């Protein structure tokens, strides 16, 4: 196994389990503990983990954007639940923005039965996913390809977005907090999402429950700028009250007990 592939698998493991142990990784990958320490050193230098005695823990600071293939596997069940709900929110003939989040790819997979949609996206994965759909207009923002994220960023992408007036935008985030609002890992990603918000009539935040009460590095918008929050399970009363106060509709999968 190449070192880069091993580090990718270690990153997936630490993202899932929040910590890893050198001795356990050494046995799992059948390499020396020194090799594992070098892998963890590289991941620490890249900002993904914080080295600890005998291993490493995930870096929760939130300023580093994880590679797309790692984010894709995180809470995939929750993202599919969100995509199922979004499917009911998109009407034939609408113009929509999809951001470069992994949740947006789940949405793209789920809405292919719709007719005459116009989709503007800065996501390479969305473009590939929708490349076989006929009767739609799929618009790429262009821009600078961000390594590992499968997203197009920069001024060219922002300029393209600002030329359009969409019915709805569906975007995700890295952190969602009542006081700090919607946050992302860095300004480059955050600014593109801000452009989409400003160019859309209705703003949907698609955010799984793991992002609640988290704050990432770069601010995108406050709660009051959102129209709808779509998540994978019912938020607690504190959040439901905040949504009510800010006039935000919250969509989540209804359980039997929710109807009583």
Image (spheres, rainbow, N blue to C red):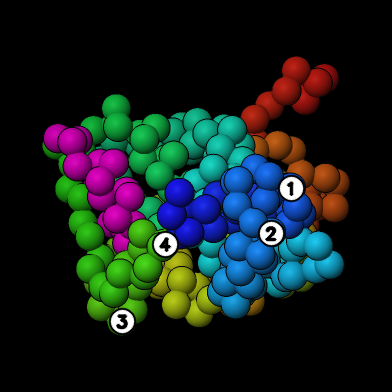
Q: Nearer the viewer, mark 3 or mark 1?
A: 1
Q: Give the labeled residue for mark 3.
A: 155
Q: Are marks 3 and 4 in contact (CB under 8 Å)?
A: no
Per the rendered image, the range of residues in magenta is 117-134
- Earlier-in-chain disc, 3 versus 2: 2
* Mark identifier at residue 149: 4
x, y percent for residue 207: 60, 50
x, y percent for residue 187: 50, 79
- Earlier-in-chain disc, 3 versus 4: 4
Q: Determine the CA span between mark 1 and mark 2.
A: 9 Å
Q: Determine the CA span between mark 1 and mark 4.
A: 29 Å
Q: Give the labeled residue for mark 1.
A: 24
Magenta stretch holds residue 124: yes
Q: Secondary structure at mark 2?
A: helix
x, y percent for residue 81: 57, 32
* Mark identifier at residue 256: none
| Residue at horizontal 41 percent and vertical 71 percent from the top | 192
Q: Determine the CA span between mark 3 and mark 4.
A: 17 Å
């Amino acid at each position: 196994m190449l070192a880069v592939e091993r580090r990718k698998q270690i990153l997936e493991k630490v993202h899932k389990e929040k910590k890893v142990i050198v001795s356990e990784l050494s046995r799992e990958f059948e390499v020396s503990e020194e090799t594992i320490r070098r892998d963890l050193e590289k991941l620490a230098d890249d900002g993904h983990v914080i080295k600890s005695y005998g291993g490493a823990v995930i870096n929760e600071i939130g300023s580093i954007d994880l590679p797309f293939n790692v984010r894709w596997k995180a809470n995939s069940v929750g993202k599919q639940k969100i995509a199922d709900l979004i499917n009911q929110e998109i009407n034939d003939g609408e113009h929509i923005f999809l951001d470069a989040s992994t949740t947006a790819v789940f949405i793209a997979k789920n809405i292919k039965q719709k007719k005459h949609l116009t989709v503007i996206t800065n996501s390479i994965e969305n473009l590939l996913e929708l490349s076989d759909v006929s009767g739609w207009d799929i618009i790429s923002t262009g821009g600078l390809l961000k390594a590992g994220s499968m997203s197009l960023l920069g001024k060219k992408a922002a300029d393209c977005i600002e030329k359009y007036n969409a019915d709805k935008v569906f975007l995700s985030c890295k952190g969602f907090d009542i006081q700090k609002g919607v946050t992302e890992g860095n300004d480059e990603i955050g600014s593109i999402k801000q452009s989409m918000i400003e160019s859309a009539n209705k703003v949907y935040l698609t955010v799984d429950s793991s992002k609640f009460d988290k704050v990432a590095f770069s601010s995108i918008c406050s709660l009051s700028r959102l129209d709808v929050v779509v998540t994978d399970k019912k938020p607690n009363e504190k959040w439901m009250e905040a949504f009510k106060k800010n006039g935000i509709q919250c969509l989540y999968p209804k359980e039997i007990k929710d109807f009583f």
